[in-house]
Image: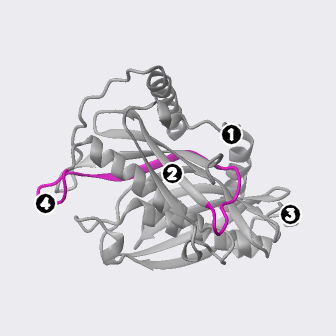
Amino acid sequence: MKLSDTKVRTQNIVHYEQTNFMGRLHGGDMLKFLVDTGMLSAIKVAKATSVIASLDNVVFKKGANLGDIIEVEAYVAYVGNTSMEVEMSAYRGDEKIVTATGVYVKIDENFRPQKVGEIIECDNEEEKAIIERAKKRRQNRIRSIKNNEDQTKGLRFRITNGVYISPDLTYDGKIISAGKLLKMMDDLGGSLALKFIGYKGYDKYSDTVVTVAISNMSFYSPIKLGDIIEINAGLTYVGRTSLDVLINVFKNGKEKVTEAYFSYVRVDNEGKPKEMPRYYPETEVEKNLWQEAIKRRNLQIKEKKL
């Protein structure tokens, strides 16, 4: 199958209910645009239900505003046995404003992985480079080892939210929409960040926070209709104008199904970055996660230079 034949494009108008008080698109809604389009590309190749297994390298280069038309492009760059490497980009006009990569897995009606049975072929040097990049990403990806502990419990700045998975939160009445789950996670992480900067409610001079990156996201098992999930968010790192929040999700009170680090930047009412309040890790958990955050950020800086 040619790489060009795997491409899918979606058009998304930014509506009022998707924006903050500055008229800027919520990060969670942008994530939904991305992963839903990525899923369509994966399904096009697999010719069957495909679900997201990991989300990497989500970088928000610029924001989108009320009334903008956001075109999202996704394509499958490499196929393994049961999984597919997918690249996703969001555009406002000709400007690329968000990029992400992810892995989708083909499943059957019992949610078991199935062989994809396709090989992605290239037509030119540019597509060849895309395929090689996907292969390298697949080889270098750090396989996440499932740890069923909730590390946010050792953090002083922490909030949690419980959600019942109703039909409107699913793709097909069976399995949760990954896009809607990501939006719920981003909303909770953003709420924690707002609490940390002392947000008291909207006025025209209010500061806010915007999502700028997501990293190290793995999905361990599907969330199904009727499940009860608990989303936990805990502050792990604070820089000059940004902070990191560890967000995890447990279903039915015992099983961790996903976790990731969300990064937010504080901005003033004109959208300009503003300094964060001072924060010093105190507990053993906070100190360990702080050091992990520094290593993760240094690795991201190194990768950007390659």
Q: Amino acid at mark 1?
A: Ser
Residue under label 3: 114
Q: Secondary structure at mark 4?
A: loop
Q: Secondary structure at mark 2?
A: strand
CB contact under 8 Å: marks 4 and 1 = no
Q: Which residue is at a point 53% across and 52% down the rendered structure image?
A: 230
Locate residue 187: give its quadrant: bottom left
Residue under label 2: 231
Q: Which residue is at a point 65% across and 69% down the rendered structure image?
A: 225
Please give the range of residues in magenta. Answer: 200-227
Q: Amino acid at mark 4?
A: Asp
Of 137 and 18, nearer the camera is 18
| Residue 292, horizontal then vertical, whole percent | 51, 27
Residue under label 1: 144
Q: CA distance from mark 1 to mark 2?
A: 19 Å
Q: Is residue 10 left or right of residue 139?
A: left
Q: Secondary structure at mark 3?
A: loop
